Amino acid sequence: MENRSPTVYRTRSWQNRRRALLALGGAVLLLVGYLLGRWQDTPADPVITGQTAVTPGAASAPAAPPAPPSTTPTSAEATPVKYPVLQAEAATELAGVETQPTEDEGGGDNVGWINRDDYLRFDNFDFGAVPATAARIRVASGAGITGRVQIRLDSRANDPVGELSVGNTGGWQKWRTDTAVLKPVTGTHTVFVTFTSTEGAEFVNLNWLQFDH
């Protein structure tokens, strides 16, 4: 058997160690590369500003919905006017009619002997900002004909804003309250109560009227 010289042995042993070190170094490099890759893929810690955590790359929070419009009224709502009772005999002008003591509840006078084309006028009546939509009219009739009581504003030539038909109530002092529907009326006006019928005869007595909403 050939004896190997120490130099040859050390040379091969050194080469083996060198290969082992190279392999180990390669493994270390691979491990370092793997760890670097994992570190880059790991999200950064959130940045805290006050009480809000912000994570880079995270989706933005949805915006808050807009506030609903304010329902607070900008001005006070109009208050309906409590309309006074308009006594017929107290009209500013009475045309073609006469007054007489009434047997209706409350006493006082009523307006009678009313024929077509007669009228009453009430000046400066304030309906207010909330529209009047009706007129209650206290009437009595012993006539055998039917006529109409009409409400006109500012001129007797204007179209009626409301009217009602009146027939026999059972007597000239047999009173009832009828209601005329009005086109909505606001503001201050001269109120005319006009009368019409197809025949030229007295057909109604009138005690009072009152507007309503």
Image (spheres, rainbow, N blue to C red):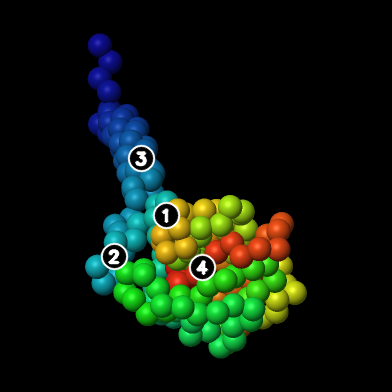
**CB under 8 Å between callouts 1 and 3?**
no
Q: Amino acid at mark 2?
A: Thr
- Against 14, residue 76 (above or below) is below
Q: Earlier in the sequence, mark 4 or mark 2?
A: 2
What's the CA distance linking mark 4 and mark 3? 112 Å
Q: Is residue 20 left or right of residue 192?
A: left
Residue on which disc 4 sits: 205
- Against 119, residue 26 (above or below) is above
Residue on which disc 1 sits: 62
What's the CA distance linking mark 1 and mark 2? 15 Å
Looking at the rendered image, the quarter that the C terminus falls into is bottom left
> Residue 37 versus residue 177: which sits nearer the camera?
177
Residue on which disc 3 sits: 34
Q: Amino acid at mark 1?
A: Pro
Q: Earlier in the sequence, mark 4 or mark 1?
A: 1
Mark 2, secondary structure of its residue: strand
Q: Position of residue 192 (x, y in %)?
A: 62, 77
> Residue 154 versus residue 95: which sits nearer the camera?
95
Q: Residues within 10 Å of mark 4 (few under 14, many from 20)?
A: many
